[in-house]
Amino acid sequence: MSIYIIFSTLWIYTSDRLLFVNIDPQLRESLSFYKGEAFVLLSAALLYLLIIRYSKRLKEASFAGEERFRLIADSMPSFVWTAKPDGTVDYVNKIFKEFTGLETYYDSSCIHPEDRAATETIWREAMQTGNQYQIEHRFRRHDGIYRWYLCRAVPVRDPAGNIIRWYGTSTDIDDLKSAKERIGGFWTAPPTDSSP
């Protein structure tokens, strides 16, 4: 590519000098034509190089952004995950992998059997409406014990409004739910006094 650019530049530069020499008009016309071709070739080559350089910078910036996201996601105490527009989970953080013992999230097998139907229904509804996804359900730990998690996901849209990705978190609320159940069993609300 660089050879073509050098050749085209030299041709444009030298052809200007040749056109002022007293030569045959047909040859002058041919030289002028090739000068135009060289100019078009040079312009196209420079545009191509700019596109390649810009694309490379975009990829590098995207990769750096992705690396930063993964670093942050892996340091979170919650599960962090992303999904494609069709709902396919394509990334889970280190905490999810350590908790479940799974490398990826293929299906709902790590969710408690009693919670699967509701989870799938609410996830499908979020996919169709594009609204925020939220549910409480139980995840199976690698040793078989289930814990309650609050799962939320929000869609990210392109300028046209189409969903391009889902970003989600799942936060352990098992201890909180257990505490609420214990308190609920011992505590009852005092009667309200309706007298004036």
Image: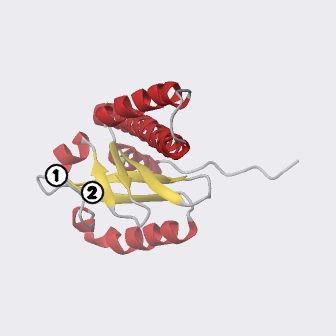
Which mark is on residue 125? none
Judging by the rendered image, the residue that carries numbered circle 1 is: 103
On screen, residue 117 above or below 191: below
Question: What residue is shown at x 39% (from left), y 49% (from top)?
Answer: 177
- Total numbered labels placed on residues in the image: 2
Report the side of 189 relative to 31 (left or right). Answer: right
Q: Residue 88 appears in which quarter of the rendering?
A: bottom left
Residue 43 or 163: which is nearer the viewer? Answer: 43
At label 2, the amino acid type is Phe
Q: Position of residue 145 (x, y in %)?
A: 18, 55
Q: Residue 63 appears in which quarter of the rendering?
A: top left
Which mark is on residue 139? 2
Residue 169 or 39: which is nearer the viewer? Answer: 39
Q: Secondary structure at mark 2?
A: strand
Can residue 72 be seen from the camera position used here?
Answer: no
Instruction: Give the mark toward the camera: 1 or 2.
Output: 1
Q: Position of residue 5 (x, y in %)?
A: 37, 33
Q: Residues within 10 Å of mark 2 (few under 14, many from 20)?
A: many
Residue 66 or 27: which is nearer the viewer? Answer: 27
On screen, residue 6 above or below 183: above
At label 1, the amino acid type is Glu
On screen, residue 15 above or below 150: above
Q: Earlier in the sequence, mark 1 or mark 2?
A: 1
Report the side of 49 relative to 138 (left or right). Answer: right
Q: Secondary structure at mark 1?
A: loop
